[in-house]
Image (tube, grey):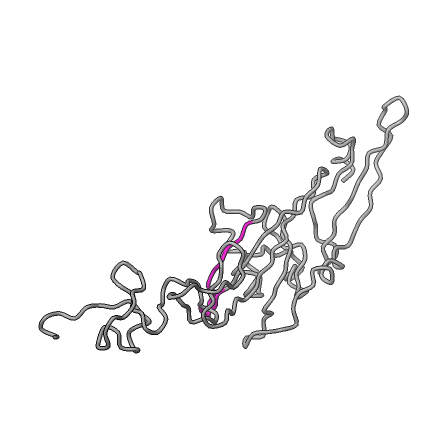
Amino acid sequence: WYIAAKADTKNNGAIWTPPYAWGTSRTGITAAQALYSSSGSFLGAVGILIKLSGLTSILGGDSSTTDDGESVFTVFIVNTGGYLIATNPSGFEFRNGSRVPAVNCSYTTIADAARVFDSSVGGSYTNENVQTYFDRKGRLHWVRSDAYEDDHGLEWYIVVDQLVNCPSNYAVDNRTGSCIECERPYTAEGGHTSTSCLSLCVEGYYMDADGKCQECKEKGMLCDKAVSYTHLTLPTNREL
């Protein structure tokens, strides 16, 4: 931090260091400021070492859990290198005294969310980046990253992950992660896999070969309730 503050030419010697391991299970960061005489001569630098463990309580989170014991709502912070700065739930920033990349986190939701950004366009976190993905159990998640940075070298991303569970006739909006109501005659099953209002039709309609819901004009095989919700495959002459 002393060398970095002395070498800084952008902010008059005011810098943040990259986060580092402080002890065996804590993350620290240093804020430093170069000191100059009235004539502009370098005199030295002062630094303040800050523990980042308090970030966990600031991140919030959700006490609701899934059947595998992980939170419905998860929040974590990473730096530009993809290493964890803070997590909620807490205690996943270190393993065996070493800092942990988010993609290798033992907390499944954090690792899955990090891999979404790692494989997205650009291969990194970006500001206001919203994604949806299916986890290892086939459940739908909404995840978003937001940049938190300043002019002194601080470059972090705050990542929010939420398990999506839309009610019946609602589907997740990929842009906002919220549940939106389907417009008739389209519908959705709801639940963790409710990704589109364009995959099912309400009763009394059937989906044609172009993926459009058409109203049933007559009762019978094509408008049977059992098939009116899904894409139809017309029978062959032999089957008829």
Q: Which image quadrant is residue 227 in?
A: bottom left
Give the percent coordinates (x, y) of residue 183. 43, 63
Q: Nearer the viewer, residue 68 or 232?
A: 232
Q: Residue furthest top?
A: 39
Q: How many labels, in total? A: 0
Q: Residue furthest front?
A: 217
Q: Nearer the viewer, residue 100 or 222?
A: 222
The reply to whether the magenta stretch includes residue 201 is: no
Name which residue lies at 63% across and 52% down.
78
In the rendered image, the vertical position of residue 32 relative to residue 177, given as above or below: above
In the rendered image, the vertical position of residue 116 relative to residue 225, given as above or below: above
Task: Check the picture and name the quadrant holding the N terminus.
Answer: top right
Q: Is residue 98 left or right of residue 203?
A: right
Give the percent coordinates (x, y) of residue 97. 67, 59
Name which residue lies at 10% across and 70% down.
237
Q: Residue furthest left?
A: 238
Task: Check the picture and name the quadrant holding the C terminus.
Answer: bottom left
Q: Is residue 131 left or right of residue 12?
A: left
Name which residue lies at 63% across and 53% down.
158
Give the percent coordinates (x, y) of residue 220. 22, 77
Q: Which image quadrant is residue 84 in?
A: bottom right
Q: Nearer the viewer, residue 51 or 113?
A: 113
The stretch in magenta equals 129-140
Q: Is residue 82 left or right of residue 235?
A: right
